[in-house]
Image (cartoon, rainbow, N blue to C red):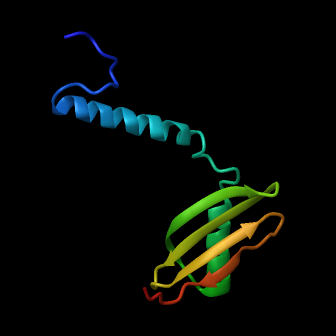
Amino acid sequence: MGTSPSCLPRRGGAGLVRTLLCAMLVTVAPLAGRAQSSDPDWLDRLSRQLAAERGCAVEYYVNIGESELAGRRTFHARAQCTDGRQFDASLIEPAASFSLSECGVQLC
């Protein structure tokens, strides 16, 4: 047998595992540079706004995102409160406060 590059599949289970690991690294590596937020304090500001305006103690966030729209930074997330309520929040700069909407019951 000849030698093959380390990311190419080989016979047997070990080759498949190596191929899958290489594929994961190739997929995840470009995202590492984007892990830093352009405004790392925005989730803290959102937590404070939810506490003040809606009485929500944030337990965790899901669907967190940042992007740019027409040259303006945008931020969005769904907050899960400790009492079970959920809120969708979004902000398009230069707005100072987030738009908040409580998530209702969804039926499929």
Looking at the picture, how far across and down is residue 12, in whole percent? 15, 30
Question: Which quadrant is the N terminus positioned in?
Answer: top left
Q: Is residue 95 left or right of residue 59?
A: right
Question: Does 51 sit above or below residue 46?
Answer: below
Question: Which quadrant is the C terminus positioned in?
Answer: bottom left
Which one is nearer the viewer's eye here, 39 or 88? 88
Question: Does 37 sit above or below residue 9?
Answer: below
Q: Residue at x 28, y 27 (%)?
A: 9
Looking at the picture, how far across and down is residue 100, in whole percent? 67, 80
Question: Does 7 sit above or below residue 30?
Answer: above
Instruction: Say which quarter of the image contains residue 24.
Output: top left
Which one is nearer the viewer's eye here, 79 or 5? 5
Q: Residue at x 63, y 78 (%)?
A: 50
Q: Is residue 71 left or right of residue 51?
A: right
The count of marks equals: 0
Seen as rendered, the residue at the extreme top is 2
Q: Is residue 41 left or right of residue 73?
A: left
Q: Residue at x 61, y 60 (%)?
A: 65
Seen as rendered, the residue at the extreme left is 12
Looking at the picture, how far across and down is residue 27, in whole percent? 46, 40
Q: Is residue 7 left or right of residue 62?
A: left
Which one is nearer the viewer's eye here, 92 or 98? 92
Q: Residue at x 61, y 72 (%)?
A: 47
Looking at the picture, how far across and down is residue 97, in whole percent? 76, 73
Which one is nearer the viewer's eye here, 60 or 19? 19
